[in-house]
Amino acid sequence: MTVTSTGIEAETPAVGDPAHMRTESPTAPGRRLLRAFATDVPAVLSTGYIVVMVLAAIFAPLIVAVSGWGPYEFDQTAIDPNLGAIPVGPLGGISAQHWFGVEPGSGRDIFARIVYGARVSLTVALSATVLTTILGVVFGLLAGYLGGFVDTVISRVMEFLMAFPALIFMIAILSALPADNRVLLLVLVISLFGWPYLARIVRSQTLSLKEREFVESAKASGATHVQIIFREILPNLQSTIIVMATLAVPGYVGTEAGLSFLGVGVVPPTPSWGQMIASAAPWYAVDPMYFVIPGAFLFLLVMSFTTLGDRVRVIVGSGEVRA
Amino acid sequence: GGGEEPAANQETTGPQSGGTVHMLQNADFSYLDPARGWDGGVNAFYRLLYRGLTMQTSGDAEDPNAIVPDMATGLGEASDDGLTWTYTLKDGLKFDNGDPITSAEVKFGISRAWDPDIGIGSPYLKMVIDAPEDYQGPYVSGDLPTIETPDEKTIVFHLKAPFPEFDNVLSQANAVPFPEGTGAGDEFISDVIASGPYTLDSYTPGSSIRLVRNENWDPETDEVRKAYPDAWEFEIGIDPATIDERMIAGQGSDASAIASKISGSSLPRLQTPELQERTISADAYCTTYMSMNTSKAPFDDVKVRQAVNWAIDRATVQNASGGNQLADVATAIIPPAVTGHKEFDLYPSEGHAGDPEKAKELLAEAGMPDGFEFTLDIRSQPTAQAQAEAIQQSLEKIGVTANLNVIDTSIYYETIATPAKQNDAAITGWCPDWASSASTFIPPLFDGRNIVDRGNQNLAQLNDPEINQRIDEIRAMEDPQEAATAWGELDEQIMELSPIAPLVLEKGIFLPGENITNYYPSTNMTDLTIVGLKDPAKS
Amino acid sequence: MALVLFLVTLFTYVIFFVLSPDPAVQICGKNCTPDRIDQIRTSLGLDEPFWTQFFTYVGGLFAGRTFVVAGADVACSAPCLGYSFQTSQLVGDMIVQRLPISATIAIGAAVLWVLGGVTSGVLSAVKEGRFLDRFFAGLTLGSMSIPNYVLALALQFVLVVALGWLPFPQAVRFGDDPGRWFLNFIMPWIVLAIGYAAVYTRLTRANVIETMQENFVRTARAKGLAPSLVWRRHALRPALTPIVTIFGMDIAGLLGGAVITETVFGLNGVGKLTADSISSNDQPVIMAVTLLSAFFVIVGNLVVDLLYSAIDPRVRTGAKA
Amino acid sequence: MNAATTNQGPLLTVDDLTVSFTTAKGRADVVKNLSFSVPRGGALGIVGESGSGKSMTSLAVMGLLPKGGSATGRISFDGRELTSLPEREMRGVRGDRIAMIFQDPLSSLNPYYKVGTQIVEAYLSHRSGVSRREARRVAIEALERVHIRDAAQRIDHYPHQFSGGMRQRIMIAMALSMEPDLIIADEPTTALDVTVQAQILDLLSEIRKDTGASLILITHDLAVVSEVTDDIVVMREGAVVEQGTTEQVFSDPQADYTRRLLDAVPRIDDEIGTLRTTAIPTVTGGTR
Amino acid sequence: MSAAPLSTETPLCRATGLVKDFATGRATVLGTKKSFRAVDDVSLEIRRGETMALVGESGSGKSTTARLVARLMEVDGGTIEFEGQDVTALRGRELHDFRGKVQVIFQDPFSSLNPRHSVERLVTAPLVYQGRKIPGGARAFTRSLMERVGLNPDFSDRLPSQFSGGQAQRIGIARALAVGPKLVICDEAVSALDVSVQAQVINLLRDLQADEGFGYLFIAHDLAVVRQIATRVAVMSQGRIVETGERDAIFESPQHEYTRTLLSAVPRINPEWDRRRREAERRREESAAHGVPAAEGAR
Ligand SMILES: Nc1ncnc2c1ncn2[C@@H]1O[C@H](COP(=O)(O)OP(=O)(O)OP(=O)(O)O)[C@@H](O)[C@H]1O
Ligand SMILES: Nc1ncnc2c1ncn2[C@@H]1O[C@H](COP(=O)(O)OP(=O)(O)OP(=O)(O)O)[C@@H](O)[C@H]1O
Ligand SMILES: [Mg+2]
Ligand SMILES: [Mg+2]
């Protein structure tokens, strides 16, 4: 949960510092960023991994058709009933048939479950990120810009939500609610507790942005509140939002995994990486691969998003951005 | 401690007196007060602290399910009409405070079961012993007139109806003596008055309990309890995986430790000769089964239920439960370790892998050739989930889709025991309240007259007049042998109706520390009173 | 603040007492009858209107109250956090009993992450762009990415099972054996601290680098001060101000964070109590833990404000924005 | 200190100074082949447009160029070559012999420490064996010298508790407490309104009269330079366009740029008309 | 100080008895809020085509007065009339229309221009906010405005940070002109610029005024600049206007003590040097006219 509270605020370059002014040719900012991005090795690598995972999630049925085993198919021949039903063969039963080995107890194909698991993990993380970002930006902007009563109400709500031990509450809420659509519930619950972190930063930035003279000058030209918020202030929050969002993704992958570990994640037999790691945990000594494989996929995903967030911040931050 | 003997001399050393036996466990005991607690784990613990008139015999006996006298000089003597049971106390019985135990204390202790707030443990005393309609235990209603104590040694019980297994009722944990007037309110929550070989030394809820010898317990009066160690230490709140690790490593005081079952994931690590030597396997006393709600479609059709029983691949369920070392396939309701078991398989298949063809035929006959969908309630617990997934997978083959409804463990039983909340099917298990008879196995689950709105045990909601009647007949049988055979037959009769699908019998693999001896673990109730140390000096 | 605390109480109460299943049924146990459930409901006061129940609870917090347990009175003095009918204990006692372990874990971890995070952050800043900086950047990324239960299990496997360097964590008291105490708690500390340490490293690094650009640091150098003095006195203190801010909040939020650590290592602290009471649906305990941690978060925020003004004279003496 | 003269040449001689930055876009020279000298007791003004390299020149002299910057050329101070001086000895020069007053007084004082502490710490680090009490006395004296009232109390206040003008004076007090031989004042009055500016300029000349220190005054306000300095260097885009005595440059500027600059200065007592900006191109690229 | 109308014509803008208080410190439980009066009974009048300069020390309330006049802040007392209409309490639609007539140019071009917007977006924004059609399309309109303020129209895609301070200030001016205002308020619009750039901007402002005939409220603390541009001057000190008058009157015979202090503190280039320089210049021009190239370069 701590991932969200990084030093965004601290790391934004000082406003108006001449060292940050650039005098490049006037290409569209988007294209310039893209170019900077394409030449940045860590950024490209992490994007690559994320894209591969997204594609794997989308085309899971096709991939599984090629690999030969579905995510729910039991393979009794791949496990040893005499030994606590552990996978037959070394490295957790890795073989030509089962590329990443099989799950103890059932003989289900880990490769297929990883591929299908990406669906849940990515869906939860990405949707929750989108939702928290929207909520956080809108509420942060409103609180920061409108101030007064609206700010008081929103700030209290944020304080209120942050005062809750989020994890405890997620567990409590999720275990009390029916498991019909866990993915949706996960997204909603994660977002419910997630948005105040972004909102807080957006709010504080808005507070200072709205004091900036360009806002006053827009106001002097007769801009409405809506125009000021969305036309004048929002563009200046761009880099903060990008960075926060990319940092949020790994946080939520981890949260989903954690909730699955605690038994309130997705409903079986649907795999998710978190659920896989959770069920692999007790096997760590006898079948380490069962644990290592989903662990490595999750680790790489989290790392990719973190790296991406970092690089985006560096690249965007080094541009003409002065806010 | 008394062991100055060299440690090398192990084979020859039986249990020695002295030392401390440790027990590692994840969950705390429910209650120190035996009127309140009632589950396998705490029952075993109560044997160290409390004595009753009768008790289940020692764990190393030939028939460990048998009931023997404890504080009583012999088993109960029933009157001809079976309504009056008389017991006589041994001499020299004392509480840990030195006070003598007389029939009055026994009666007082037993009458606590009627207290609405305290008597939340075993219900059998209340069910069987006659009592005034509005009797609310000694603290509220005073003396219980239906238990008589003509003298200090004699105690007479009056029953509501004949109950041939009354000795079993008195072996329940809540039929133990307490000094008159004690134990009101929360008095026995953190401290107790012991009558057994040990007494409470310290108790930190959720983390540790220490028992030390009750100096007022006279071994001469006790044929079952051996009480070798000087003290017991229960370490509570340890992660199950860590318990396994510690038992395998067996370092330091862990060599003098025992614990509950080893989990399936640790099993492959027990393959070294030393560990194999320590490993003890114990039979299952409980049956894991899937109940099918016969009160509504599709499981109101016996063919559909039979089809499910045919289709389930019990081998995959067995593997999901940890493989053949930890589970046997169940085909009957009563497990082999419980008296009354009958061996049969009405829905046989090659390697217990299920017979989808047969199942499909039946489905077609039932008018559902394309299968159906149903909701299966399961606990949010890994093994239960794995078992459910295995069932789901085997039913998929006959076109039946099982949607899993994971319910948090804490509210699972409440949910499925409320017919209004219960779904089409549920995975659960049943253990007998006493294993010397199936009378606590079949009736609670299949007596149609037991179906209630809340706290319902008859999950299948089977209400078959023939079966109900047969239950009454067997219960009335005086001869335990005859009754046992009859229960087995009834088991088969019920399985014809297929209200449940027996799945597996979950056995236990136990790994005591290497200094432990005379340990006879059981999945029902491990007899802790006979456990001892090889070398008390090492504990 | 009081309002927030009140709302937290109210909402927690609503969620746990109204939305979740009947606690009476749970207390009732295996052989339960509908009559008995009603009886328990009455004795728990569950049949009273919601607001009555709620204000009884709040009243207990401030004035204490008395529970009737099995016909006898159990006094619960203020602040009364309730009575757990599942474990038959006063929730306050349960928490107080477990607080030392949680505090040990939390404080140890906090020391570790603050020292570790700030040191590596400063080192990264000093060696900006050089090997050490990159090394810490990698380390930080790694530790931000690894879920802490994975780390916990991995550490336990490597350090305890495979290498045998450390014992299985047990709640040893410091007074009994400081050495063993340390060995027993080192893993929980690491697990809990590492995520925070990563964040602190990043923050410290960024802040120190930024402060080094400040004009007043240049002034300090222009005065001819020794570099160590410049660093210590002029760069570090301002750079640490925001860290103090988040530190207060992090410490306050640890209660929730310790759940996984304590559960995995089987340490019987408040975190584990939370996990246990969630899995046994012991509502008064969950309620109390939630309240307690909300209280910590709010107090933490308050302390941070105070600390902030202690550290930054501009805040203390009321400077204009 | 100023008595410790080793030779009779100019106090500071800058010869062929080039300051360059390595940026993402390669090397950029922000000061090019700059040479000038400051006589003992003399005052030199450096003027020029914003970004012409005035501040970088002074920072190069102090050896305090920001990250990424480097200087080549010779800077000789009181006979010593500063560019090749080891950092340890350079520290002895900074603050003690050359003191610098930075442009922005608020950001140049550390907001976390009392102003007294900040003055005292410099004094203590250069004068070994001086007691805190003594250092404090010196600090109070320095504050009194810059006309801070109640100096004995104000010494325990934090920077933000002073007004802009006072902060500027504190910076000056800090610089002067060491009785340096050379004061470099980088735009010391830009943020101030004319009344405060006048006070500060008076103060500077007063102190120079007392201690005989030399001064480098950096500004883009030509009127200020004309009032304070003896010599002047006019810079543009990192290079010198003109230098000479103040009187010379003001009364007969040689460089076209200087003339345009002088034309552009609005004069309070001048006739009203179009300010002469004719020769300055209206539209250039995007640089500043 | 009362503002007796000096002419019969209705002034473009008239502020009477403006008061503004700022809360300082929080309200306590016991007492009411403390407040600080930043503007105290200020009256001003700006006529069409005239430049009213407002000078005074830092913190004397100049910007606050400007904000009050531009209705960017609510007054705590006094009235503001614009073209004869009382605009002190305008709201909604009418306030919106008023905004189309009064424009503000701020001190720091970089902070008053949205760093994320291109010149085109910046310059057309007032029209967008006014809900007016952009005559001739955004591109062409921007180009024509840029030309008018002396910026290269090809740079209409650039961001403010890609311009120098003087250029950026011109974007601000172009933006102010976009809606065809009647009154332009320049809050220290030239203070941050160095002299050469400052001169360009002042000239531009003067030229535009000549073309469009609007009024300026010109705030500055540099009296030399004021002397160049103002037609009338008001001197502020501690929230009050201590002296108002025609420019020359103020500069030549200041009445108020504070004004005199202010004037005496202005640094001056030795007039003798200036005289000599002009002479040298003249000589140089003459010789240039005779075909002799002037010497250029450093001495
Ligand atoms: N860290 C840096 N990296 C690259 N270029 C820099 C850096 N710092 C300053 N510069 C450039 O060096 C040049 C000289 O800057 P300097 O600060 O000396 O100007 P100045 O004459 O003092 O201007 P001002 O009057 O605005 O203070 C400028 O063009 C500036 O952009
Ligand atoms: N939002 C505000 N809250 C509180 N006080 C304020 C606020 N805005 C301005 N002030 C105070 O009001 C007084 C007048 O401020 P104003 O900005 O009008 O001064 P000014 O004459 O424009 O000064 P400068 O020349 O420094 O720009 C100052 O003392 C200032 O501190
Ligand atoms: Mg400069
Ligand atoms: Mg102002």
Image (tube, coloured by chain):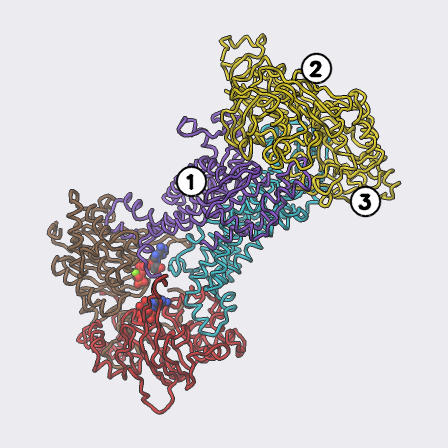
Chain colours: A cyan, B yellow, C purple, D brown, E red
Element class at badge 1: helix
- Mark 3 sits on what residue? B297
**Alpha-carbon span between mark 1 and mark 2:** 58 Å
Depth order, front residue of C45/D190: C45
Q: Position of residue C103 (x, y in %)?
A: 44, 38
| Same-subunit check for callouts 1 and 3 | no
Q: Where residue E249 is drawn, which disc sits there? A: none
Q: Which residue ends up furthest to the front in the rendered image?
A: B150
Within 10 Å of disc 2 (Cα), the crowding (few <14, some 14-19, many 20+) is few
Q: Position of residue D82 (x, y in %)?
A: 23, 49
Label 2 lies in ligand 1 vicinity (Cβ under 8 Å): no
- Mark 2 sits on what residue? B62
Element class at badge 3: loop
Residue type (three-letter) at the residue carrying disc 2: Glu
Depth order, front residue of E78/A88: E78
Residue type (three-letter) at the residue carrying disc 1: Ala
- Mark 1 sits on what residue? C110
Q: Position of residue C299 (x, y in %)?
A: 42, 48
Q: Is residue A58 left or right of residue C67?
A: right
The reply to whether the C-beta atoms of the residues labelled 3 and 2 are less than 8 Å apart is no
Quadrant where the C terminus of chain C sits is bottom left
Depth order, front residue of B124/E76: B124
Judged from the image, the quadrant occupied by ligand 1 is bottom left
Q: Is residue A168 visible?
A: yes
Within 10 Å of disc 1 (Cα), the crowding (few <14, some 14-19, many 20+) is many
Q: Position of residue B271 (x, y in %)?
A: 63, 20
Tell me where residue B418 sits by quadrant.
Answer: top right
Residue type (three-letter) at the residue carrying disc 3: Ala
